[in-house]
Image (spheres, helix red, strand yellow):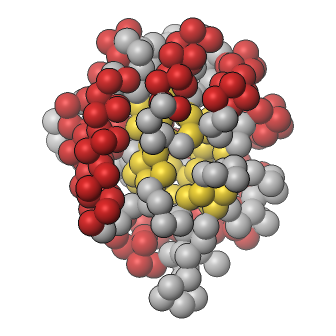
Amino acid sequence: LAMKSQPNHQTVISLSKQVIIGGDRLVVIGGPCSVEGLDQMEQVAQSLSAIAVAALRGGVYKPRTSPYSFQGMGIDGLRILAAMREQYGMPVVTEVMAIAQIEPICAYADMVQIGSRNMQNFELLKAVGQIDKPVLLKRGLAATVEEFVMAAEYILAHGNPNVVLCERGIRSFDPFTRNVLDLGAVIGLKQLTHLPVLVDPSHAAGKRELVPNLAKAAIAAGADGLIIECHPTPEQSVSDARQALSLEAMAELITSLEPIAAAV
Ligand code: PEP
Ligand code: MN
């Protein structure tokens, strides 16, 4: 069950020998919205491996609003992610959108992401319940906390205990931020469940200038870590350009998180 059985019950999930989510140390996952090419990912991995970013993200199967937008590099993108893992020793996380993508993704990635748009794709949840890789489950665009927890429950019930929850903002009436980061839900999920909770301030904010302080607020609220979008040339990102941090801004943010992480 996703619910806590005792107050100090906490699931700890390993992406590799060194990278553990839900333990004493804050885990930051960073990388672009989409894998765009080898050169882009090399710049990202080189830069992030030199700071305290534990794992790399990058979508290769992208859930785009428009069918005419870039849909992701697919298998070629997976090979780039695997090459970065090899070269820089960083575990990699990427999104799965369909049952048929599970096998290739599991062959290359260390963690499988279920995106917001698929949080209640129950057949996909059941299918990732049967894999032996950890799952990063993002909250649905308009999902209640209960629906979110029950989506995690699907994965656990089908045999995979390694689920990390990710709050990434929910829809509201106000277009000022792309979504509204629900820190109350982060606190509540930490109290109710034993699963690690990450926060994605990038998709919540939708604007890069809001990301650093939302990240700090998430740590202060008790999140186990963060997943943040960044890019060597943010304005040129093929997807989610407006919210991408530069690699320099990412390094600055990581440094500024240390005192907050030490205080909670
Ligand atoms: C992503 O991580 O790039 C993504 C599409 O996120 P979400 O599912 O939270 O919108
Ligand atoms: Mn994105």
Q: Nearer the viewer, residue 207 or 248?
A: 248
Percent of width and height locating residue 183:
29, 60
Q: Is residue 123 visible?
A: no
* Farthest residue, direction front: 50
Horizontal arrangement in the rendering, residue 186 relative to residue 76 (left or right): left
- For residue 247, above or below residue 190: above
Percent of width and height locating residue 256:
26, 44
Horizontal arrangement in the rendering, residue 61 relative to residue 223 (left or right): right
* Farthest residue, direction bottom: 6
Q: Nearer the viewer, residue 208 or 153?
A: 208
Picture quadrant of residue 73: top right
Q: Is residue 213 visible?
A: yes
Horizontal arrangement in the rendering, residue 42 relative to residue 47 (left or right): right
Q: Nearer the viewer, residue 255 or 3?
A: 255
Residue ID at (70%, 53%): 17
Residue ID at (60%, 71%): 11
Picture quadrant of residue 20: bottom right
Percent of width and height locating residue 223:
39, 61
Residue ID at (57%, 9%): 39
> Where does the N terminus fall, quadrant-wise?
bottom right
- For residue 70, above or below residue 63: above
